[in-house]
Image (cartoon, rainbow, N blue to C red):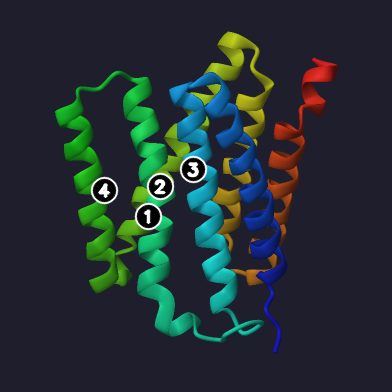
């Protein structure tokens, strides 16, 4: 059986695990909260993509019965990105809890009424805000990693938007995002900037 996006899922999962572990080591050295957010994002996203890959016809062929679990696993990196935005904007802890709670509730509603596409809307808003935030950070601080991370998020967002057109295109965009993030976090770009 063909699995058009499987290669993309396993590539981005592997790259995200590697970046996540690199960032965990960096956090242990520097104790920087931002690094912890990024490491948490990459590790949880990697787990989500790996579980998605394992559920496909290439491995266990249980995707249809795993959709609910995949949505819940995929929610975690989204909430980390949302928490990061709220922390960056210095939103009060009560408002953070409220907004994260609402995002979680809307995502759970999606499980019962998927035709409303609530999760798609919530995810698109969170990812778009992060793209804007990281591009602003790149412009202000000349931080090439912020630009690279934003480009990776854009590629994932476009790939997700095109998944209904073609799973192969989705897989290609996942690979492009993985390559972008691998280059971004390898330190190669800092040598040229």
Residue 13 % position (x, y): 63, 57
Residue, x 51% and y 52% (percent of image)? 45
The quarter of the picture where the N terminus appears is bottom right
Residue, x 72% and y 59% (percent of image)? 172
* Of labels 1 and 3, the one closer to you: 3
From the viewer's perspective, tell me whether residue 29 is left or right of residue 123: right
Q: Earlier in the sequence, mark 4 or mark 3?
A: 3
Residue 161 makes an appearance in the image: no
Residue 20 % position (x, y): 59, 42
Residue 125 makes an appearance in the image: yes
| Residue nearest the observer in this picture, 169 or 100 | 100
The mark found on residue 31 in the picture is none
Q: Earlier in the sequence, mark 2 or mark 3?
A: 3
Q: Is there CB contact under 8 Å for labels 2 and 3? A: no
Q: Earlier in the sequence, mark 1 or mark 3?
A: 3
- Residue furthest to the front: 29
Measured Cα–Cα span from mark 2 to mark 3: 8 Å
Residue labelled with disc 4: 103
Residue, x 25% and y 22% (percent of image)? 91
The mark found on residue 78 in the picture is 2
From the viewer's perspective, tell me whether residue 173 is left or right of residue 97: right
Q: Is residue 85 above or below residue 119?
A: above
Residue labelled with disc 1: 75
Q: Earlier in the sequence, mark 4 or mark 1?
A: 1
Q: Is there CB contact under 8 Å for labels 1 and 2? A: yes
SS label for mark 2 = helix
Measured Cα–Cα span from mark 1 to mark 2: 5 Å
Residue 76 % position (x, y): 38, 51
Q: Is residue 74 above or below residue 81?
A: below
From the viewer's perspective, tell me whether residue 113 is left or right of residue 193: left
Residue labelled with disc 3: 41
């Amino acid at each position: 059986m063909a699995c058009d996006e499987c290669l993309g899922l396993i590539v981005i999962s592997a790259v995200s695990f590697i970046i996540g572990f690199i960032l965990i080591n960096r956090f242990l050295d520097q104790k920087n909260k931002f690094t912890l957010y990024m490491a948490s994002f990459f590790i949880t996203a990697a787990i989500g993509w790996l579980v998605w890959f394992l559920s496909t016809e290439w491995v266990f062929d249980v995707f249809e019965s795993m959709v609910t679990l995949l949505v819940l696993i995929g929610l975690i990196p989204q909430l980390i990105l949302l928490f990061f935005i709220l922390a960056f904007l210095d939103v009060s802890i009560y408002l953070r809890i409220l907004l994260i709670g609402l995002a979680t509730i809307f995502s759970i509603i999606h499980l019962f009424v998927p035709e409303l596409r609530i999760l798609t809307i919530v995810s698109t808003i969170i990812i778009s805000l992060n793209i804007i935030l990281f591009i602003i950070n790149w412009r202000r601080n000349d931080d090439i990693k912020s630009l690279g991370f934003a480009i990776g998020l854009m590629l994932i967002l476009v790939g997700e938007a095109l998944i209904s057109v073609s799973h192969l295109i989705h897989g290609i965009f996942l690979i492009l995002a993985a390559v972008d993030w691998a280059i971004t976090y390898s330190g190669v770009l800092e040598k040229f900037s």
